[in-house]
Amino acid sequence: MLKIVARSSLSIIAIFCFISVIAFSSLKISFFSFIGNDETKTESFLYMMSMENRSLHSVLPFNPKRSLGKDALQLLTSINLTDMKTFLISEIPGLYASSPKILIAGEGSDFTNLPIESPPPPDFGEWDETEEDIEKQRAETLALTDDYKAYIYHSHTRESFLPLLPGVTNPNSASNKEKNVTLLGKRLGEKLEEKGIKTLVDTTDVQSILSQRNMQYYQSYDVARELVVDAMNKNDQVELIFDLHRDSQRKDVTTTTINGQSYAKPYFVIGLGHSNYEKNIAFAEKLHNKLEKKYPTLSRGVFEKPRNEYNNGIYNQDLYEKSLVIEIGGVDNTLEELYRTVDALAEVISEYYWEQAVEASTNK
């Protein structure tokens, strides 16, 4: 019996070592790369650091290659070679403070494919919008004010998608002025309107305002808060508020196939940095469950982020209980995939809205 156990153990260890060798051999760094010339040393060092500091992707290729070895290693050990935290996260509890936690997991969601927030654009602060341009844009948006029920905005206006930007390698570039996440806000607004929910879509360029005021990228939510408060003051009937983003994860994490068509997977973010967050969670959970029922495998789930030096942790959700950050797809998703998902979100949001309206009228 002991011989059988010993042989089995040795076999498992041998398989693990074999997979590890294949996986690590697919990395762009090795011991020898650090004793080569200066260019090789620099590239290897930057690559290693970019696994944790995503802003370094702006000076490195944005397409890390997958391999069978890396996938097998992750399946067996939950170690993701492109995310250094997975080597230590189960051993050092403090690392969880800088990572989002899963409140409700969608299919395929675990700590090896947690959301990745976009780094600041490499050309942040070098934009040509004037203060007059920004004020004109805001005036045009607010001129539409009239009994809106939903409000959509974008704290990170310039987040974009590589398929929309031929020849571009960085989807966080400030040059993504037209083809960015605001396309999804406009689409969601149109679809909600079709379903009888009057929607105000605010495409104010938050990053341009930051640039004009000499503010930092992490202050995006502070500027966005001004937009939300302004819109709420002028629209006291708003009941649903959505801040749309996109994740920086790659296509294998952010895409699913339903009835033969590919969709960009969304997820909901809840900030724990205020006392009323449980109501935001309840709202997100209802939308997640409706997506699960109508479009199985679509939602990545609901994630929480505490308030600390790494995270904003509020995301302006303290302003209203039915306020959510929704991240739709990732850097590799096509506009067709994104629009299919937006249409699905519009379907479940409108279903939720009209159910609540019927319930409110019944209770009068």
Image (spheres, rainbow, N blue to C red):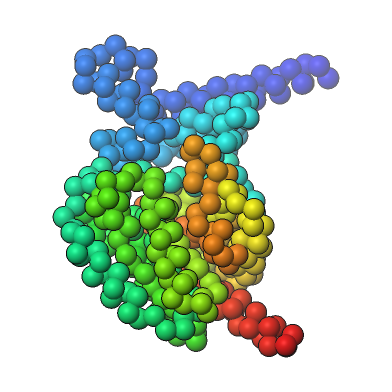
Q: Position of residue 6 (x, y in %)?
A: 74, 17
Which quadrant holds residue 297?
Answer: bottom right
Which quadrant holds residue 319?
Answer: bottom right
Q: Residue furthest front?
A: 233
Left or right: 116, with 174 as reference point = right
Residue occupying the point 43% across, 76% down: 234
* Residue 108 makes an appearance in the image: no
Residue occupying the point 43% across, 71% down: 231
Q: Residue furthest right?
A: 1
Q: Position of residue 247 (x, y in %)?
A: 43, 52
Which quadrant: the N terminus? top right
Above or below residue 326? Residue 233 is below
Q: Position of residue 128 (x, y in %)?
A: 16, 55
Which quadrant: the C terminus? bottom right
Instruction: Judge by depth and name the residue closer to the eye, 283 or 246.
Output: 283
Q: Residue furthest left?
A: 128
* Residue 269 makes an appearance in the image: yes
Residue occupying the point 50% across, 86% down: 196
Instruction: Judge by depth and name the residue closer to the eye, 252 or 43.
Output: 43
Q: Residue furthest top?
A: 35
Residue occupying the point 63% across, 56% down: 277
Above or below residue 70? Residue 334 is below
Left or right: 176, with 250 as reference point = left
Left or right: 236, with 358 as reference point = left
Instruction: Judge by depth and name the residue closer to the eye, 362 or 212.
Output: 212
Above or below residue 204? Residue 35 is above
Which quadrant holds residue 82?
Answer: top left
Q: Position of residue 141 (x, y in %)?
A: 32, 74
